[in-house]
């Protein structure tokens, strides 16, 4: 009996010891000791991005709410010192009443009173909307956040400052990628590209979009956001939201308001980004801005030229219309040498700034030029390092004296899509000249044994072709089609390595490859969408160009050239910045305006509108003249 009692006692002691051990382990775990995310947790604690709770525990496994995600974003940005605290105070006042009406708490443990500033910051910079904030609270309870929603919030916040082009073809490798909403894929991909999340997912290869998020996972996102914003260049943010477009009033006898905003930017090229078709221009005051030259006409003097002729330290003039560069002017073309790459020496001299380039000219003699770290190099249209050049590569050297400004190289095999700028006689082909979607113009010799694919007659200017090169010499030309615009319904979206879109036009299906420069815009011709925003059976206006589908616009674009009509204002919608008008045929039309222009007009005004008809009833105004009585 006594032994049995001792056994019971021992068991009780063992159980008590286990409880103590478990309790200690739980306490240590709550403090992140030995945790898999310990480096990130310690980092956000030190920077006061995600503080501990009052009992000095971090609680890494505790599920977080949507509100905590937005607060952690704000504190991550604030910790970098890149936002203006006075500006945040103004923004907070702007949204304070709405947030109180929704029942959003002013304080949130362990963050203190950062709730309203965090939400105001997110609202002002379009990271979320007031409708999304409404679901942050359910009764008296804060709602937990899904992983996919937290990822979208973080990606949008990152892109406020990085301004990356999100409209690209994306193939996620997660096994459950199909469960990620299409609208969220581009944001998840941005976090992958910036290293905030893994492209491989969990141990099973899943992203788990609908899973809850722990404080440990949130610490990884917050630390990643802080590190991204603390390194590299960030876009400067101003008053928030979309910048207002100033109004230019023309001095005429009538009250005329011009809605097109045009300006000329002059300066010097301080950086060139070939892969993005962008340049950084430093103006006379020393301020540097980055401009996309996609779709811009590039001229040297009065001659049409290529993006390749833009190099660092070049004087440049940009014509900018409604924030888009329409024309680029540079004062002179560089000298050109064509040949084959032979050798690039090591650095010459103590400064280690210059190397010597040796090329073989067509007459088998040699030429030597100086190459610097600032020399731009592309191989098969992609930015490359000098070390990537190999023997026999075709090189086009753009130089000023002995100094090389750019090297354009072609490897043993390179294929591209282009639009012919000049016809080709298939019986006696000599030279191919074509525009590429990179903004460059290729001009090269055609091999005597060139192969023609799908070609039954001479090729004409404007034909779309696929060209195969060997060391810069044309080996194969495949006819792809003609540049054109079609109107129909979207009947197929094929997401794969080489994506395709299918359209139904006049009861016939036509399938086209997707250009790497695809633009997708809304019915009004504004906005920037991705392929994942497309839906089947949508009516679309489609441009077929270099590489396949180059532009998809939602809706039927009936008139592409500017036109005009006389109308009477029947309703002014200031909140939407729209006018409802009736024309001389008593037909009701909707007129779209740039930001904050609707207040210039009143019901009953007779106005003459110049612009473009985007659909049967929607008219895009570029100029409005108020008719005098």
Image (cartoon, helix red, strand yellow):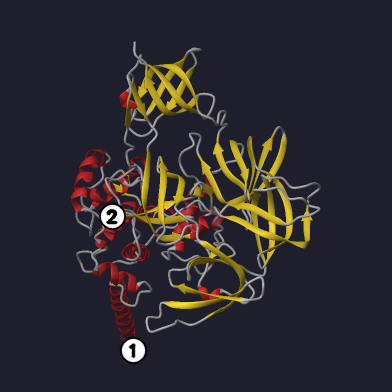
Image point 64% across, 52% down: which residue?
434
- Residue in front for this viewpoint, 351 or 118: 351
**Which x, y percent locates residue 113?**
19, 53
Which quarter shows the C terminus? top left
The disc, 2 or 1, on the residue closer to the chain's N-terminal end is 1
Q: Is residue 196 left or right of residue 113?
A: right
Q: Is residue 562 left or right of residue 45?
A: right
Image point 46% across, 62% down: which residue?
192
For label 1, the crowd category at 10 Å Cα-Cα, with few meaning under 14, some 14 to 19 and many 20 or more, is: few
- Residue 397 picture quarter: bottom right
- Residue in front for this viewpoint, 253 or 479: 253
Q: Is residue 530 above or below residue 190?
A: above
Q: Is residue 395 above or below residue 503?
A: below
Which quarter shows the N terminus? bottom left
Query: Label for residue 71?
Result: 2
Image point 32% across, 19% down: which residue?
253
SS at circle 1: helix
**Which x, y percent locates residue 56?**
21, 69
Inter-mark Cα distance, 2 to 1 = 60 Å
Residue 409 in sight: no
Question: Circle 1 sits on which residue?
Answer: 3
Query: Label for residue 373?
Result: none
Q: Is residue 626 left or right of residue 118?
A: right
């Amino acid at each position: 009996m006594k032994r049995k009692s001792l056994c019971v006692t021992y068991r009780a002691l063992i159980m008590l010891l286990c409880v103590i051990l478990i309790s200690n382990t739980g306490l240590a775990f709550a403090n992140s000791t030995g945790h898999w995310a310990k480096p990130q947790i310690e980092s956000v604690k030190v920077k006061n991005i995600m503080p501990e709770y009052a009992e000095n525990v971090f609680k890494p496994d505790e599920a977080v709410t949507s509100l905590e995600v937005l607060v952690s974003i704000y504190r991550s940005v604030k910790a970098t010192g890149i936002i203006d605290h006075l500006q945040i105070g103004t923004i907070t006042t702007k949204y304070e009443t709405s947030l109180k009406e929704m029942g959003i708490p002013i304080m949130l443990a362990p963050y203190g009173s950062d709730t309203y500033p965090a939400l105001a910051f997110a609202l002002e910079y379009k990271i979320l909307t007031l409708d999304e904030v409404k679901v942050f609270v359910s009764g008296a309870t804060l709602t937990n956040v899904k992983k996919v929603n937290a990822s979208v919030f973080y990606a949008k916040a990152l892109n406020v400052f990085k301004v990356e082009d999100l409209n690209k073809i994306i193939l996620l490798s997660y096994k459950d990628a199909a469960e990620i909403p299409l609208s969220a894929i581009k944001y998840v991909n941005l976090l992958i590209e910036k290293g905030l999340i893994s492209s491989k997912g969990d141990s099973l290869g899943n992203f788990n979009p609908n899973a809850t998020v722990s404080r440990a996972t949130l610490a990884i996102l917050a630390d990643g956001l802080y590190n991204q914003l603390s390194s590299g260049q960030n876009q400067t943010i101003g008053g928030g939201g979309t910048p207002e477009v100033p109004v230019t009033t023309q001095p005429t006898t009538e009250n005329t308001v011009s809605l097109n905003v045009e300006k000329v930017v002059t300066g010097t090229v301080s950086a060139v980004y070939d892969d993005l078709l962008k340049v950084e221009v430093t103006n006379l005051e020393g301020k540097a801005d980055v401009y996309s030259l996609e779709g811009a006409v590039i001229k040297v003097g009065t001659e049409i030229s290529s993006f390749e002729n833009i190099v660092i330290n070049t004087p440049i003039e940009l014509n900018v219309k409604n924030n888009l560069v329409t024309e680029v002017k540079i004062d002179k073309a560089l000298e050109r040498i064509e040949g084959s790459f032979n050798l690039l020496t090591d650095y010459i001299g103590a400064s280690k700034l210059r190397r010597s380039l040796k090329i073989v000219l067509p007459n088998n003699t040699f030429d030597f030029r100086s190459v610097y770290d600032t020399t731009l190099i592309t191989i098969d249209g992609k930015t490359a390092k000098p070390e990537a050049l190999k023997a026999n590569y075709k090189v086009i050297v753009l130089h000023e004296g002995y100094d090389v400004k750019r090297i354009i190289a072609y490897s043993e095999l390179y294929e591209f899509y282009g639009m012919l700028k000049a016809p080709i006689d298939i019986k006696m082909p000599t030279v191919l000249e074509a525009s590429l979607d990179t903004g460059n113009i290729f001009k090269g010799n055609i091999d005597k044994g060139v192969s023609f694919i799908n070609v039954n007659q001479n090729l004409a200017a404007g034909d779309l072709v696929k060209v195969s090169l060997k060391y810069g010499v044309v080996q194969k030309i495949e006819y792809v089609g003609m540049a054109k615009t079609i109107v129909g319904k979207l009947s197929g979206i094929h997401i794969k390595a080489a994506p395709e879109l299918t359209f139904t036009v006049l009861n016939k299906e036509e399938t086209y490859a997707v250009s790497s420069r695809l633009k997708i815009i809304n019915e009004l011709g504004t906005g920037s969408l991705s392929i994942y925003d497309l839906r089947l059976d949508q009516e679309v206006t489609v441009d077929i160009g270099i590489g396949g589908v180059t532009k998809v616009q939602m809706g039927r674009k009936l008139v592409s050239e500017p036109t005009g009509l006389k109308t009477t204002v029947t309703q002014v919608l200031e909140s939407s910045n729209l006018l409802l008008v009736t024309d001389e045929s008593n037909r009701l039309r909707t007129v779209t305006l740039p930001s904050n222009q609707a207040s210039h007009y009143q019901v009953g005004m007779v106005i003459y509108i110049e612009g473009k008809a985007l659909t049967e009833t929607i008219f895009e105004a570029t100029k409005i003249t108020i008719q005098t009585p």
